[in-house]
Amino acid sequence: MSARTLVTGGTVLTAADEIAADVLVDGEQVVALATPGSTLAASFTPDTVVDATGCWVIPGGVDAHTHMEMPFGGTFAADTFETGTRAAAWGGTTTIVDFAIQSKGGSLREGLDTWHAKAEGNCAIDYAFHMILSDVTDSSLKEMEALVGEGVSSFKMFMAYPGVFYSDDGQVLRAMQKAGETGGLTMIHAENGIAIDVLVEQALARGQSDPRYHGQVRHALLEAEATHRAIALARVAGAPVYIVHLSAAEALAEVASAREAGVNAFAETCPQYLFLDVDELSRPGFEGAKYVCSTPLRPVEHQAALWRGLRGDDLSVVSTDHCPFCFTGQKELGVGDFSKIPNGMPGVETRMDLLHQAVLDGHISRRRWIELACATPARMFGLYPRKGTIAPGSDADIVIYDPTRVQTHSAATHHMAVDYSPYEGRTTTGKARTVLSRGKVVVHRDEYRGHAGHGRFLRRDTCQYLR
Ligand code: DUC
Ligand code: ZN
Ligand code: ZN
């Protein structure tokens, strides 16, 4: 017989509702929401009772953009699937969608198999994959349909990083056409990498080698231009498009005007663009390297536009682009040449809490918090209502969230395998008290109770905003 769990005394908060209810879990799934004290609640005989008094009972977070163990700039992102998914669980995230990578000259199949091997048996929470296309050819285009059938229904291409992950406009167009035919969703890293490389070379020739020049050469207009081009190519292909890690107000304006015209253009942003700004890159010594990611952090004025985009629906998802590199030994690869700093920041553990702080600060409503962090990413990437909500039939991925607990962020206490916190010393209010993944308690009151191998691969449906 499967174990039964009763979550009682809390307020269930989903993207749609806020209700005082007990959650009845049988095995791995939610079987009912019941009025506290009702016959239904009283007749349920749980093996475990989880007290949620004074807490929000929310769906586990869905982080649709992570890069565990990603190869980049001659090194690898510091979190493995084991450490990264454990950190995610600590932070109230119970599903990640990571990026499998096609290598140049390799097939999608080889790339996907490699990523399955990295993840299988190692994850604390459930996981799925997008596929990065690094080599769009006749044969890789042919493989896309099979991947959609296997639950890998989204494909990322880079307009940045020439010679590495870069796809030219013809390749982007062809892959978008194919994605359109097969029901796949194209995700675009929208920066004009060819122009950026010219500016990098010119900056280095002038002796401008510090981390702060990373922010200058990756100009906001070059994000906006690529965003415009990506959307135009998607329109020509008759396919939807999803812009990843949008950071510039000018790029957001491109998405907004396309959406206004009825185009299926979607976009996400990430907490680093909402809570940090370009000034971090000018920290003394080489400290700015901790904040090198692409797209880059922007001047603080961009944040108001991003919050506005999140309150409407021009930005519909907040994911992390979690891609951590240690300061010592990894970020340091770029001492004397900012273009050699591995791009990326940690974030998988802190997203839910930073967004809860945004609720307290009045930027978004609490139901919008759940929509941006759980429900919409699940719908966007074909996981709803299994993930992203609390309803009969959903996986019992449930977070008992204490909205009053104060925490001070620090590398000394976080669980990500990286030697710095971008938010070191910053205080936020709200923290997961208990986290259930498919009915199993994986975190409870500052104790980790999960294990590597509990997390399963999720075959995803196609995007649920297109039918
Ligand atoms: N941006 C990053 O900051 N890191 C990984 C890849 C990317 O596009
Ligand atoms: Zn990217
Ligand atoms: Zn990324």
Image (spheres, helix red, strand yellow):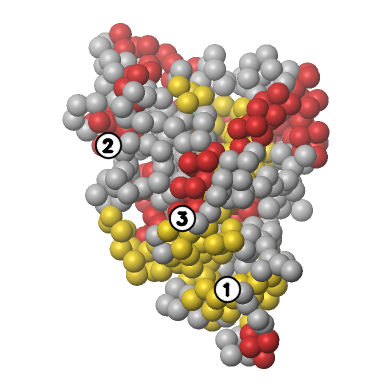
Three-letter amino acid code at disc 2?
A: Glu
Q: Earlier in the sequence, mark 3 or mark 2?
A: 2
Image position, residue 96 (x, y; %): 57, 46
Q: Nearer the viewer, residue 298 or 77?
A: 77
* Residue type marked 1: Thr
Q: Earlier in the sequence, mark 2 or mark 1?
A: 1
Q: CA distance from mark 3 to mark 2?
A: 32 Å
Residue 448 - label = 3
- How far apart, in angstroms, are the residues tagged by discs 1 and 3? 17 Å
**Residue underneath mark 1:** 48
Along the polypeptide, which appears first: circle 1 or circle 3? Answer: 1
Residue furthest out toward the top = 205
Tag 2 and tag 1, C-beta contact below 8 Å = no
Asked if residue 73 lies left or right of residue 374, the reply is left
Quadrant of residue 243 in the image?
Answer: top right
Label 1–label 3 contact, CB within 8 A: no
SS label for mark 2: helix
Q: Give coordinates of residue 180: x percent, y percent.
A: 76, 37
Q: Amino acid at mark 3?
A: Tyr
Q: Nearer the viewer, mark 2 or mark 1?
A: 1
